[in-house]
Image (cartoon, grey):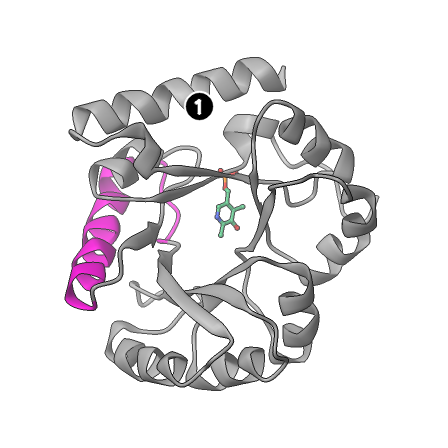
């Protein structure tokens, strides 16, 4: 099952990259494993996946003990991070994609653990969406420049949900423009249903859950 789904996702990534005149190697597939057990991560690892995205610090904390020996794997925090979980987040994750304020940046930095980070950018007015508004981006970047344990590698965004990729494309284009403006080469954008549009607009990380693992019907913890 997973093998077939992965083949399909790989084919979609390759086709989109070709169409955009980009190389497949420029794009990292982050397998989003929230609400799936550690076994699912191990199975994906066995099929060659190395990057995994999780939304909740607490959930991943419970799975982490079952994930030893997955050499070369990188775990990305892709969900909103509350500052009281910041310490555990840098202990558990290789990449924190959801830094959205100078305060959170300084807090993450204070624990002395070398961590790659991205800034989550909020590109819509929608209340529920987390992230730094574009006008605060330079303040977060300046704060990160003073953080000696954090390495800023790019920008991340999560547009308002739409089943029509053409409606999310403008958000991807906007993030790419901000990436150029601030000379940040990585863009984390695009999910199961709109990864093609994201790749065409320049995504270097796509975050894919459902298309690999099926619907997230289960509750966590089980
Ligand atoms: C759940 C989630 C994804 C994956 O979404 P799918 O539609 O299942 O591919 C990607 N990014 C974030 C931030 C998520 O929370």
Indicate whether 181 appears above or below 64.
below
Check disc 1 and report the residue beneath it.
9
Q: Nearer the viewer, residue 162 or 178?
A: 178
33 in magenta: no
Q: Position of residue 20 (x, y in %)?
A: 17, 30
Give the residue at x 74% y 61%.
58
Task: Report helix, strand or loop for mark 1.
Answer: helix
Q: Nearer the viewer, residue 189 or 65?
A: 65
Name the side, left or right, on which 157 lies relative to 135: right
Does residue 214 appear in the picture of this structure?
no
Indicate whether 155 appears above or below 22.
below
Secondary structure that dominates the magenta span:
helix
Number of numbered discs overlaid on the protein picture: 1
Q: Quadrant of residue 147?
A: bottom left
Quadrant of the image containing the N terminus: top right
Does residue 176 appear in the picture of this structure?
yes
Q: Position of residue 6 (x, y in %)?
A: 52, 21
Q: Nearer the viewer, residue 70 or 103?
A: 70
Quadrant of the image containing the C terminus: top right
Give, as a single range, the part of the protein colored magenta: 159-182
Q: Position of residue 34 (x, y in %)?
A: 64, 45
Q: Quadrant of residue 217?
A: top right
Q: Position of residue 96 (x, y in %)?
A: 52, 62
Label 1 CB, ligand 1: below 8 Å? Answer: no
Q: Nearer the viewer, residue 217 or 212?
A: 212
Name the side, left or right, on which 129 lies relative to 112: left
Give the residue at x 57% y 69%.
81
Give the residue at x 64% y 31%.
45
181 in magenta: yes
Q: Residues within 10 Å of mark 1 (few under 14, many from 20)?
A: some
């Amino acid at each position: 099952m997973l093998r077939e789904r992965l083949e399909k996702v790989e084919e979609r990534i390759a086709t989109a990259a070709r169409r955009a005149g980009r190389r497949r190697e420029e794009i990292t597939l982050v397998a989003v494993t929230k609400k799936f057990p550690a076994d699912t991560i191990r199975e994906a690892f066995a099929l060659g996946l190395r990057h995994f995205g999780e939304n909740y610090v607490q959930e991943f904390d419970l799975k982490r003990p079952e994930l030893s020996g997955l050499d070369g794997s990188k775990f990305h925090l892709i969900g909103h991070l509350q500052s009281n979980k910041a310490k555990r987040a840098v202990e558990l994750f290789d990449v924190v994609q959801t830094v959205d304020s100078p305060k959170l940046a300084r807090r993450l930095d204070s624990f002395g653990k070398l961590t790659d980070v991205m800034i989550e950018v909020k590109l819509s007015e929608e209340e529920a969406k987390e992230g730094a508004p574009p006008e605060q981006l330079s303040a977060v970047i300046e704060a990160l420049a003073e953080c000696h344990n954090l390495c800023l590698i790019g920008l991340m965004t999560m547009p308002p949900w739409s089943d029509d990729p053409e409606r999310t494309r403008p958000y991807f284009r906007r993030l790419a423009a901000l990436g150029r403006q601030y000379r940040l080469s990585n863009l984390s954008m695009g999910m199961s249903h709109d990864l093609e549009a994201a790749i065409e607009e320049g995504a270097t990380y796509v975050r894919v859950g459902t298309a690999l693992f099926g619907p997230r019907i289960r509750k966590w913890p089980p």
